Image (tube, grey):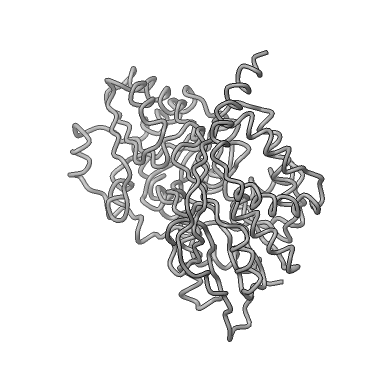
Amino acid sequence: MNEYATVIPTAINNLKSAARFRPADMIDWARLVKPLRQNGGMESFDLYQLAFHMFTRLPFDYRPTRAGAGLPLSPWAPEGTAEPSVGLFADSPEHLSGVARTLQNWNRIAAGRDLPFRVHSAGDQPVIPDAACFPRVGTFRLHAYDGLSIHIPQIGDVLNYARRSRFDVIHISTPGPMGLIGLLAARERNLRTVSTFHTHFPSYVARLTGDRTLEDVCWAFMRWFYNQMDRVAAPTTSIREELMEHGIEADKIAVVGRGVDRDTFSPRYRDESLRLSWGKAGVTNLLYVGRLSKEKNLACLAESFRELAARRSDVRLVFVGDGPYQQELMRTLAGLPVVFAGVQSGEDLSRHYASGDLFLFPSETDTLGNVVLEAQASGLPVIVSSGGGPKDCVQDGVSGLVLPVMSPHTLAHAVESILADPARCTRMGIAARRHTRRFTHDAAFDAFWQLHRF
């Protein structure tokens, strides 16, 4: 009965949104889904089943748009190289996230090496230099993940472009609409496929909705999708093991890590005037950088800080970023020494990192957490959970702490254990900076590119 109380309102909401689907939208999606269902890979999976569960369990909003006028994109035909031509298909590269920054770094390094690599997405304009951007004909927004827009292109236009372009390998960055179109394009031409497990969608679904049925369906989709790939990139060893546990073939999965720019993120950006702008001097600034959203386990961080602040007056919590959970955090932490610094970029972001004293990242859903590397490069000890991929970026007991159980009490206790020994905190910060020497963008890109050499 409780399930119906959730399913029925969700279905009614989505029926209202579905009323905006045009006949052309329905026909276009049938052109994609029907052939993908006919050859489902290693595990049978019905995409209509996925659609049904999403329709009844995940509130969304759909807004059709009129595709911008203009000539079709010219086919991509790189010449004069022995390297494979890689077309990467991605959804929402404009979204402020570690995934978007990773795509930007890959694109930058490929261009610098004159490699045949091109990013493909849908939207109003490309956000990555020299990317192919297909006009959107509609946009989905999920209520549970506020701020993320998933743009839908004219599927036939993308497929026609892919048929005329010279791809050796198609890399599918995300298993959304653009990713599924890339998969169909690869099938049509019998091309090799590589994909990256960037985002832990099953865990996100569980955290954001609390719906275990939807989480199970999401894992079934992940198995169906990734087992069709020739190769799969996992950002850390822990995530590789988790993918294997959930039925994705082990021999397909390779670890492709991430890098951090140690010139951009460095202790030299520490700014005492910025620290004073946060409040009184002589306190320890506990820093969080990232999206302010429920799936980041920020309720744990908030409750942990309330516990700390009740016992001591020498701590302050600084949030850098924004998101749908910010108002809830502000209510929960009202009256406490907390700063909401908003979204920062460029040198301002570097200054915020380096001006902290201890970095807290309670997320158990991240597959890696670029911010954990950036904080360590900035000279901050970090505290992370043993759940997810960030722990693989930390030397437990050396550059930070990995908590076997992430709870408000264990997090508060870990912070106090570090603050009780200032010399240890200093050593950890130095070790954190030193630890990031092994995480370079070039080495990460080398591992990424090697996957495409068949």
**Residue 379 visible to the viewer:** yes
* Residue 408, above or below 197: above
Residue 163 rendering spot, x and y as whole percentages: 66, 70
Taking the spot 19% from the left edge, 34% from the top edge, the residue there is 281
Numbered disc total: 0
Q: Position of residue 262 (x, y in %)?
A: 39, 59
Q: Residue furthest bottom?
A: 80
User: Where is 78 relative to 133, above or below?
Assistant: below
Residue 209, percent from left and from top: 57, 28
Locate residue 217: give its quadrant. top right
- Residue 443 picture quarter: bottom right
The quarter in which the N terminus is drawn is top right
Foreground residue, 64 or 266? 64
Q: Residue at x 60, y 42 (%)?
A: 200
Instruction: Specify whether 159 is left or right of 69.
Output: right
- Which residue is located at x 47 percent, y 56 percent? 123
Looking at the image, residue 284 lies above or below residue 434: above
x, y (%) of residue 116?
Answer: 56, 75
The residue nearer to you, when weighing 55 against 247, is 55
Name the side, left or right, on which 430 lies relative to 365. Answer: left
